[in-house]
Image (cartoon, helix red, strand yellow):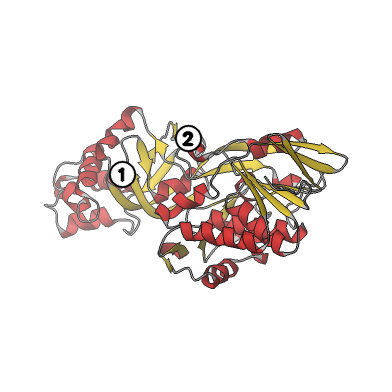
Amino acid sequence: MPKTSSFDAIIIGAGAAGMFCAALAGQRGRRILLVDHSPEPGRKILISGGGRCNFTNIGATASNFLSANPHFAKSALSRFTPADFIALVDRHGIAWHEKTLGQLFCDGSSKQIVAMLLDECAAGKVETAFGQAATVEHRNGSFQVSLGKDVTQAPALVLASGGLSIPKLGATSFAYDVARSFGLKIVEPRPALVPLTLSGEEALFKTLSGVSAEVVARAGNGSFREAALFTHRGLSGPAILQVSSYWRHGDPVTIDFLPDLRPGWLRQAKRDDPRITLRRLLGRTLPDRLAETLSDQLGIGLELGNIPDRALDAAEHRLAEWQFAPNGSEGFAKAEVTIGGISTAELSSQTMESKRVPGLLAIGEAVDVTGWLGGYNFQWAWASAHAAAQSL
């Protein structure tokens, strides 16, 4: 435990947002205590990006985020950009590379990002209390945080303990519970960037477990062109994880299996090669097992020359707008992030401070700002942490 019982700010949650906020505020000369109930900081960082940490996305803008207020993230994101974080990574000599769609990963290990954040915290003389469960009270304008038998206090408290995703790594409702205790509104948390499950007649697609294809997937007002993966439980892969953030129970997920083909391609194929079957034709673009299943589902087994144009048009339309009806998702256990959280209507977009409780701030995944797959949520962690740190 720290010897000092009084700080300028107490930050609860030693994930990406919490550690970065603590480091920046500490380097501004603030006395900071960083608390986490886990004995190890940055556990979610360590598993991210397949262990290589997809630490930002070079194209990150507010349009890549979901929130009840789509404008809320603009201020923080504009004041701390991907280039700013890349400069920090470079300063620490961490090698990185760009994958598809602007995603940046460590060449080595995500452990390097955790080590970098801890080094930055050390540079800011941040004191830590890891493996400590915290309880919070507010008295006389001061936040009192009990850690076992010890009590610390500060005029500012930062909620950085994240959302409900991946409970096996220690995710809890702590940030929401504290926010509610102060009367702050919570946007209903639900799993995001999560595989979707299928049942009933669609269960036959489970025989395709392990098969993937590049598609355009749509749900709600979200549309993404990436790989979709069939699993023994339903649908996954980047395209599905992306649209899961936009999906609501009862809504369909629409898949275009052949996004590069122009309208009329089946009639043209019939004219070019009337003896070809749909299965063989689909197999030129799609994995064989998927081509077989789709042609069987469409009931077109004859050579195309024997199929009326009207039937080909119907098949073409269905392949472009194949609808699945997920019966749910794999839940918070498999969700990469939580959508929803502490309402942005309660917070200043400039400082991340509560409008009704002076000195109470919320950052990162605890807030109702959720990014796309591909490094966006880390960029929100860095940007919201930066915004809060400048105000502490």
- Say what secondary structure mark 2 lies in: loop
Q: Position of residue 104 (x, y in %)?
A: 46, 64
Mark 1 vs mark 2: which is more N-terminal? Answer: 1
* Amino acid type, mark 1: Ala
Name which residue type carries label 2. Answer: Gly
Give left or right: position of 301 versus 61: left
Q: Which of the numbered marks, if any, corresponds to residue 314?
A: 1
- Crowding at dot 1, Cα within 10 Å, few <14 / some 14-19 / many 20+, comes out as few
The answer to which quarter of the image holds residue 262 is: bottom left
Residue drawn at (71%, 58%), measured in percent from left and top? 389
Pick whichever, 185 or 289, lies toward us.
185
Name the residue furthest right.
140
The answer to whether the residues at label 1 and label 2 have Cβ atoms under 8 Å apart is: no
Q: Residue at x 50, y 48 (%)?
A: 44
Q: Nearer the viewer, mark 1 or mark 2?
A: 2
- Distance from disc 1 to disc 2, alpha carbons, whole Å, reads 35 Å
Q: Which quadrant would residue 232 be assigned to in this image?
A: top left
Q: Position of residue 224 (x, y in %)?
A: 44, 53
